[in-house]
Image (cartoon, helix red, strand yellow):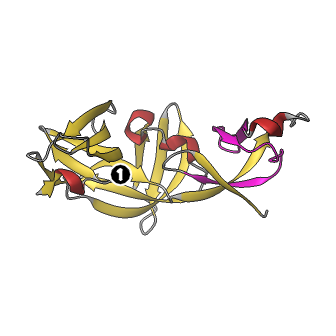
């Protein structure tokens, strides 16, 4: 059993009759009130995202997840196909709703970790930081840097992310796949 303050992003928990992947977890302690854990989580089976607050009296179980090294192969008609690294004949597919936004960062032949619960494939886990090539970037306009903002670029997988103004088309950038945020520019 997990206590309300042991919930962390990336965990898969069994709660309220469902199976949920924790996306965000913030511990709040307000004046003269009981502390709560505000959690944003995705129902693994339906793909729906919901927000809730766990109280000190709440208890939940961490789901027993089996992890299997896998490789992303390709996408076809909304199905994302993978195979097992040790047994390439064992292929399986997941839908975009089961991936919960992770499909934005999938590259052909990249290694991922498939997550299984009760012998059923539920999702994948990506490396936390990955490098991508910028394929489309608007030019920076003189004076833009005074605001300290950024610009939106497209990376090789088709995902759009916010980066600093000095990033140009053809640059390699490191992205946090959990948040979708730019981390740093890398060497090619």
Q: In this view, which residue lies farthest toward the bottom? A: 86
What residue does disc 1 label?
9
User: Residue 102 placed where, x, y %?
Assistant: 49, 44
Q: In this view, which residue lies farthest toward the front? A: 32
> Is any part of residue 94 visible from this angle?
yes
Q: Residue at x 45, y 56 (%)?
A: 83
Region in magenta: 149-176
106 horizontally vs 67: left or right: right
Q: In this view, which residue lies farthest toward the right? A: 142
49 horizontally vs 179: left or right: left
Q: Nearer the viewer, residue 76 or 97?
A: 97
Q: Nearer the viewer, residue 101 or 108?
A: 101
1 horizontally vs 77: left or right: left
User: Residue 133 placed where, x, y %?
Assistant: 74, 51
50 horizontally vs 69: left or right: left
> Is any part of residue 138 visible from this angle?
no
Badge 1 marks a residue whose secondary structure is: loop
Q: In this view, which residue lies farthest toward the left? A: 57
Judge whether 72 appears above or below 142 on screen: below
| Magenta-drawn stretch contains 34 | no
Asked where in the image residue 63 lies, by quadrant, the reply is bottom left
Asked where in the image residue 32 lies, by quadrant, the reply is top left
Q: Nearer the viewer, residue 6 or 102?
A: 6
User: Residue 144 placed where, x, y %?
Assistant: 83, 34
Please rate how many residues cluster around mark 1, counting C-alpha atoms within 10 Å: few if below 14, some from 14 to 19, many from 20: some
Q: Residue at x 43, y 69 (%)?
A: 86
Tally the marks: 1
Q: Residue at x 61, y 51 (%)?
A: 107
Q: Nearer the viewer, residue 37 or 176?
A: 37
Q: Residue at x 78, y 64 (%)?
A: 187
Quarter of the picture holding the C terminus: bottom right
Quarter of the picture holding the N terminus: bottom left
């Amino acid at each position: 059993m997990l206590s309300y303050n042991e919930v962390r992003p990336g965990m898969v928990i069994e709660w309220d009759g469902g199976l949920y992947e924790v996306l965000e977890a913030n511990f709040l302690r307000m004046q003269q009130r009981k502390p709560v854990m505000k959690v944003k989580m995705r129902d693994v089976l339906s793909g729906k995202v919901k927000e809730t607050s766990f109280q000190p009296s709440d208890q939940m179980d961490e789901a027993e997840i089996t992890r299997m090294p896998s490789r992303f192969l390709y996408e076809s008609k909304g199905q994302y196909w993978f195979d097992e690294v040790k047994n390439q004949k064992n292929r399986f597919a997941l839908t975009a709703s089961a991936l919960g936004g992770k499909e934005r960062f999938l590259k052909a032949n990249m290694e991922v970790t498939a997550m299984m619960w009760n012998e059923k494939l539920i999702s994948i886990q990506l490396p936390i930081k990955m490098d991508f090539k910028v394929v489309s970037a608007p030019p920076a306009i003189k004076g833009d840097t005074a605001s300290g903002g950024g610009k939106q670029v497209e990376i090789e997988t088709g995902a759009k992310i916010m980066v600093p103004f000095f990033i140009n088309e053809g640059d390699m950038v490191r992205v946090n796949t959990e948040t979708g945020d730019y981390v740093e520019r890398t060497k090619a």
